[in-house]
Image (tube, rainbow, N blue to C red):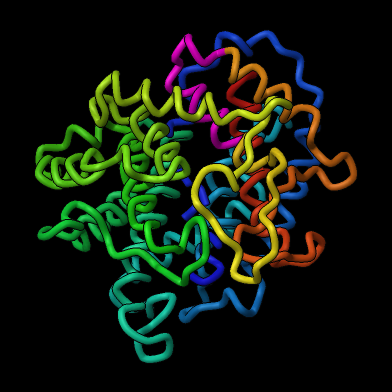
């Protein structure tokens, strides 16, 4: 989806049950959960009604920069805000995903071959199948001890599209519009790691289901194969997956990724998404090397989940950076595009900040 993670989303842990960061548990946050919720709700509502996101059967595209991170993060704010249930934009997003899952054979792919060229149908289906499973598994993990029928259907759709031969065996076709970091040449690995997160967070011991063990074996082998050659952005998602799917990585592999992310922390305590790979903007403008909310939120959250005592000082500094870098006027944490210079006040210019705000929320609410 061309606007489908132009992140982290295409990600995505049993957040409420996740291991908390002991180094940060006593911190007194100075950020504004209400402002963050208002921003996320407004952006999700805008996305659902944006004509460019509209798809057939009255549905809309599930973007990884805005929609998927929103579905993962917004429920984490309920306790802080004293909310009894999901917000209206959450309800709309979950209804949209459920509709596309239950009408899977009838709805058109987000980008059909007939209008976007080969192999966009298979890429769209693979990407959407992963995101649907991720979103519904996350929803169920927060509110139920078992996997819903809708989420189980989403996983059935997912496994039916898993590749079974050659180098990509164990992964899925994934959208490639040459947009970093989610729709680029190596983004299929990112997508497979998100699928692993969905499996790991699914309630009701879904990962132990006998009928999916052969699928999980293929996925585990794919993710382990050459993981050290992936860029750090993809490896952070893998680290997250390993925290919610025990046995996905060895302890030594987890430590290697945690150490690499700790070394990439900047002097101010944050991280910059531009430093997590060999990215180059298409318009030739220089990348923004400053610490940003997306990299800092995502990495801090992943390091919290693995609970490696050696990196708790980095977690604490990351949380401190996040508490002081929320925009008080909008509730947003900023992140810049890796693909071109964008007006940060435009809708497209906010895509990376949508993801940044969601992951900042996940890290900060997990610390509480």
Q: Could you tell me which residue is drawn at 52 percent across and 71 percent down?
A: 2
Picture residue at 23% right of the left edge, 38% below the top: 224
| Residue 136 drawn above or below residue 167 | above
Q: Is residue 108 magenta?
A: no
In the picture, measured across the screen, residue 31 lies left or right of residue 252, that is right
Left or right, 6 with respect to 321, comes to: left
Q: How many marks?
A: 0
Residue 11 x/y as whole percent: 48, 47
* Residue name at image x 51 percent, y 16 percent: 311
The residue closer to the viewer here, 315 or 178, is 178
Q: Is residue 213 above or below residue 66?
A: above
Residue 46 appearing in the image: no
Q: Residue at x 42, y 79 (%)?
A: 111
Residue at the extreme bottom of the image, as rendered: 114
65 or 68: nearer the viewer:
65
Q: Nearer the viewer, residue 280 or 118?
A: 280
Q: Is residue 107 left or right of residue 90?
A: left
Asked where in the image residue 292 lies, by quadrant, the reply is: top right
Q: In the rendered image of this protein, does residue 290 appear above or below residue 121? A: above
Q: Which contiguous range is marked in magenta?
A: 297-312
**Residue 241: which quarter of the image?**
top left
Residue 77 percent coordinates (x, y) = 66, 34
> Can you give x and y, in whole percent of width and height, for residue 156 in the image?
23, 56
> Is residue 328 rendered to the left or right of residue 174?
right
Residue furthest toward the right? 329
Q: Identify the main secondary structure in magenta.
A: helix
Screen quadrant of the C terminus: top right
Tell me if residue 299 is in the magenta stretch: yes
Q: Locate residue 30, reporting x and y percent.
A: 81, 23
Q: Is residue 33 visible?
A: yes
């Amino acid at each position: 989806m061309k606007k489908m993670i132009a992140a982290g989303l295409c990600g995505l842990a049993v957040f409420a049950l996740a291991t908390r960061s002991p180094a940060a548990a006593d911190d007194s946050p100075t950020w504004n959960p209400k402002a963050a919720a208002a921003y996320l709700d407004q952006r999700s509502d805008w996305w659902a009604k944006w004509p460019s996101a509209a798809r057939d059967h009255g549905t809309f595209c599930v973007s990884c920069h805005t929609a998927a991170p929103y579905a993962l993060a917004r429920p984490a704010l309920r306790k802080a805000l004293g909310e009894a249930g999901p917000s209206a934009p959450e309800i709309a997003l979950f209804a949209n995903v459920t509709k596309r899952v239950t009408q899977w054979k009838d709805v058109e792919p987000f980008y059909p071959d007939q209008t976007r060229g080969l192999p966009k149908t298979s890429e769209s289906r693979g990407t959407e199948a992963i995101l649907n499973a991720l979103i519904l598994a996350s929803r169920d993990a927060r509110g139920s001890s078992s996997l819903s029928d809708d989420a189980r259907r989403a996983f059935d759709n997912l496994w039916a599209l898993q590749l079974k031969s050659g180098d990509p065996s164990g992964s899925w076709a994934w959208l490639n519009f040459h947009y970093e970091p989610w729709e680029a040449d190596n983004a299929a690995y990112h997508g497979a790691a998100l699928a692993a997160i969905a499996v790991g967070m699914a309630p009701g011991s879904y990962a132990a289901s006998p009928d999916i063990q052969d699928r999980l074996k293929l996925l585990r082998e794919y993710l382990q194969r050459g993981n050290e050659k992936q860029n750090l952005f993809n490896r952070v998602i893998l680290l997250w997956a390993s925290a919610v799917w025990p046995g996905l990585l060895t302890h030594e592999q987890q430590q290697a990724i945690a150490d690499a992310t700790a070394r990439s922390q900047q002097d101010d305590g944050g991280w910059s998404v531009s430093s997590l790979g060999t990215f180059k903007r298409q318009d030739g403008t220089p990348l923004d090397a400053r610490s940003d909310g997306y990299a800092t939120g995502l990495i801090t959250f992943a390091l919290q989940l693995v609970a490696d005592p050696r990196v708790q000082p980095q977690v604490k500094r990351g949380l401190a950076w996040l508490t002081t870098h929320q925009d008080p006027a909008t509730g947003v944490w900023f992140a810049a595009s890796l693909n071109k210079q964008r007006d940060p006040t435009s809708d497209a210019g906010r895509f990376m900040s949508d993801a940044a705000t969601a992951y900042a929320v996940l890290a900060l609410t997990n610390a509480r």
